[in-house]
Image (tube, rainbow, N blue to C red):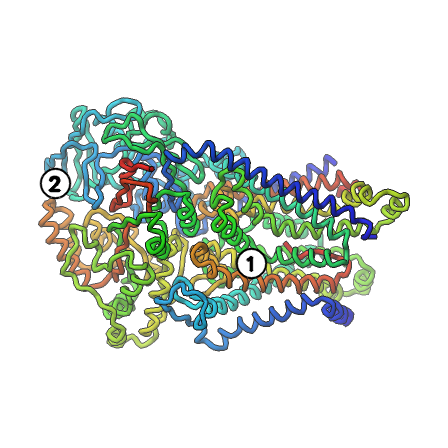
Amino acid sequence: MKDFVLRFFKILNKDKFAVISGFILLFWIIIAFLPFMIPSLTNIPLTLNERLANPSSKFLFGVDGNGQSVGLLIMNGASTSLIVSLFTVSMSLFVGIPLGAIAGFFGGRIDIFISRFIDILLAFPPMVLPIAIMAFFGGGLINVVIALSLTGWVSYARVVRGQFLSFKEREFVVAAQSLGASSTRVMFKHIFPNTISPLAVQATFSLAGVIIAEAGLSFLGLGVSQAHVSWGGLLNSARDYLTSNPTLAFFPSLALFSVVASLNFIGETLRLTFDPKSIGAGRM
Amino acid sequence: MLKVLFQRFLQLLIVLWGISTLIFFMQRMIPGSPADSVLGADASEIDKLEWLARYGLDLPVWKQYFYFIINLIRGDLGKSYHDFTPVVEIILPRLWQTIQLASVAFIFSLLLATAFGMLSAAKAGKLTDKTSAIVSLLAISAPSFIIGPILMWIFSVKLELFPLFGNEGASSFVLPAVTLGASLAAFSSRMIRSGIVDVLQEDYIRTAKSKGLSPIQILAKHALRNAFLPTLTILGMQLGVLLSGTVITEQIFNWPGLGSLVVEAVQQREYNIVSGCVIVMATIYVFCNLIVDILYRVFDPRVRFS
Amino acid sequence: MTSRFTTKRIIISIISITAIAFAIYQTQKASNENDSANSKEKKNTLSIALDSKIQSGDPRLIGGDANSQYIENLRFLPLIGFDEHGNIQNILIDEITAVSNKSWIITLKKNIKFNNGSLITAADVVATYNAIMNPEKSFPPSPRKAAFNSVTLFKVNSPHEIQINLKDPDASFLNNLVIGILPKDAILNAAPNKINDKGYESGPFILKKTTATDWLLTRNENYNYSSKPKVENIDFKIISDSGTRYAALIRGDLDLVQNSIDPDKVSLIQKSMTDKFQILSAPKLSTTYLAFNFRDPIFSNLKVRQAVAYAIDRRSLLQFRLQGQGSLAKGMFPPDNYFFDNSLPEIQYDQQRAKNLLKESNIQDPITFAIKVSSSNKSTVEVAKAIAANLKEVGFQPTVEMLENSVFLDQVKKGVAQVWLSPWVGFKDPDHLRFVFASNMVAPLGGNRGAYSNQNLDELLQEGREEINPEKRKIIYDQAQQLLSADLPYVYLWHSLNIAIVGKNIEGYKLYADGRYWSLVNVTKN
């Protein structure tokens, strides 16, 4: 692990983009936490007579069609994105790791069963499953998390399964088994640590993926309910004003883009740290 | 080879069965009945029951499922509830639109990716390569609902170069195809680059070079072909994703494809259309993967048929 | 090693240039082709944007979908229609004689023809109506069946005379005769939705082509109900995104957009683009309201309902959010309606009073609830957000829950929603009040979704349904409306307007109260 940390900082030292990304991400995390610290920030007043005002000293980022400050909306949107992405990724990890480990370690029928199920979920047209789920449960923060986790765990399960498959026949595992270590012990003590690094890379990229997916759902009008602000929802409302007030779409776009890009850059750096030979470009 | 193909085909059937089953039960669980959508919210219960009975929707769910599967095996996807048109007749023209758009986007991204991939491979480690890495990472970070409206605003609203909506001839393809293909292009250019770089370090390339082959010959004869294999896999899968994942782009550009049909149909509780679309999309996706798999084996006999 | 690949740049450049050239070539080719072929056709074609899909073109299958009804109006003549003000108007009917309050004899106009040349007769009318009442086995039940639930008989008395008998008296029944008439031949032979290109149409326009995004109508050359239309083709374009509709209009891709441009854009056009467009506006049969669920102990409390009513700043909402495009509502009927009652009190915005009422209601806990709203109409969602902000200021704790339309209706009808925001649109007869408030009309039987119940009102509304004399009906419905405005089962917000934005080169377009496009018959494009 020490090696990784060292190499990470070595790469960081050369890779200014990752450093900048880190600062951008930190900035957004602070922004996202502000509404939790200061509850009055979640109550965004309507100033109907200033609707659609352009950015000014009073409203730095302009005012939307409802007379609400775009700056405050983006801030609240940041907390929504943060909550949704963190919860979705943890839920996905929570489901994906055990299923992938079981499939990879035990193989046989249970592996076939889990793998086919993964195939089914993967062959589902993207967005259709979340759309159907959102229609079923209705909008809402928890429902978005459920909808996105239901398909999200698949990628982790695949990563973990792959790692378990390749590691279960390595000498040190076989040795541990022949010394009488139980399956659970082998799984957790010997193989699992090796899955952490690819999982970390995967998780970073999928944090970005989830933020995009949540915004996409809200963009289609199916996301978190109106009680929560979503960047996708802001973009959806802003689309109506694209011809008359293009600035309205600009700041939410910038916010979303900067977070996603930072996560992708950091993910890329992590990938280089763990697997210096690979050169990819993020996860699709 | 045949045995493997047969196995693959069997797996494919299982996946399709799973998908149809999933979408079938999911739709029956969603609140709101198609009777409400067709007859209007205020229709009387008696009328609704009669209407549901006409479509067999009053039966117990397991019976409905039984008929659904039987009809599916016979290739019958049912009829639209709103205008009684067979679902196949509704889906086919929409599918054609989506295929057109996805193919254009695919070709666009392939051209772009090859050009940039080769360029960065040639300059591996240099500024060009680094810039292209950063640009592609940025392109991947911009989702279609950001790129789409921006392109639309610049090229359709301000410059009036392209049509605003729908499919009105070749020029309509440009903006949606760019929106759809941008991240794919970025992604595959990196794949091609790393493929070429790997190949260029192989021994046989060095041999070729020492034989005095020109760089272009080396690239064309060996490097590109081998770099293409891993890329092919990704691209094949992506073609499937492209074909089935155009929902948001189609919404933005009012494209009359399958993606917008699905969204519409879910909202109107058109069970038959939704399941029809999902099954068609999934079939395409699964077949794309299968074809890639076969191609991969054809190009690279080293891969064992397992 | 890499330095030896400089030649590759050339390849790359060639590929890129070819790609770009190809793209440009394609665009140019397409635009050239379009220009020469389309310029002539464009002059004779009127492009109109619709905001959602046209569900069906077959009068037997059309249900509540307004866009389908609009197209039906242009293609198939019905017995009755509605004029600009929403008043009933004879179309195929020459004369109606009421035999009793349950029976009518209708004489049809002679000489009016279908596109295939045959005359429209009583047999066609009765065949169409019977097909809707009792469809054949191979046919889906018609969504319009409910309109004829009380009919006992449609009878052909002579080639141009029809008799209709009802089970119970129903003064509003004639409003149901809006269904486009198909030839008897079509009823017998045409499969569902297979009625195009067969000369079955009788209206000013016939259907030429449909695609997923366009419905192209063309002039009916055999049309003889009124003068023939002047424009040759009408292209109804389905554009679901309102921003795109606006951009297309501004670019000149559209000639006419009705009721589907946001208030903000309308006022923008009004301010800066009057040289290119004219804006028509007229009252509309539409009432937006906030409704309460009487099953809920909190909202069955009159004081709470009053507090809500006083807390909403309807005037500012209308002025700013809707840019003044509507009129404040005092009751269900808009001011130009015959049954509008001018003496109804208007509820003034009064925060202090709302707070006091809330205190008097003796409810200690903070009142938390969700205002439910359908996601199908973006501007209603925005209004709901603003109302929630208003209510927060006097001490309620509302959230806005946006639901997909089917789910919204499901919840509202099942009585799950406590408070919801929605419009009633297109009701043509005051009997609508019975449908909405009578205690025997609690959903799913009717439109009384909040389970409101008031015996006095029930009696009045039944009386109104059975009365045929319009003056007497008016007196009855005035009383009913007074009762409702005191009891507040709804907080009425506003009546929106019909708004059409028409290119300056279009002449003769008029708005109809129910939004129909009938005036296209008289429109010319220069």
Q: Quadrant of residue A154?
A: bottom right
What residue sits 42% from the left and 70% below the top?
A44
Q: Quadrant of the N terminus of chain A?
A: bottom right
The lab-note entry on whether marks 1 and 2 share a chain reads: no
What residue sits 38% from the left and 40% below the top?
C47
Marks 1 and 2 in Cβ contact (< 8 Å): no
Tag 1 residue: A212
Residue type marked 2 = Asn
The chain that hosts pointer 2 is C
Residue B84 is situated, as x and y percent measured from the top left of the image, at: 40, 35
Tag 2 residue: C101
Query: Where C86 sits versus C232, above or below?
Result: below
Q: Secondary structure at mark 1?
A: helix
Residue A2 is situated, as x and y percent measured from the top left of the image, at: 77, 72
Residue A183 is situated, as x and y percent measured from the top left of the image, at: 73, 62
Q: Quadrant of residue C48?
A: top left
Q: Is residue C419 visible?
A: yes
Q: Is residue C172 left or right of residue B5?
A: left
Q: Nearer the viewer, residue A275 or C191?
A: A275
Residue B189 is situated, as x and y percent measured from the top left of the image, at: 69, 50
Q: Is residue C404 left or right of residue B18?
A: left
Residue type marked 1 = Ile
Q: Quadrant of the C terminus of chain A?
A: bottom right
Q: Quadrant of residue A69?
A: bottom left
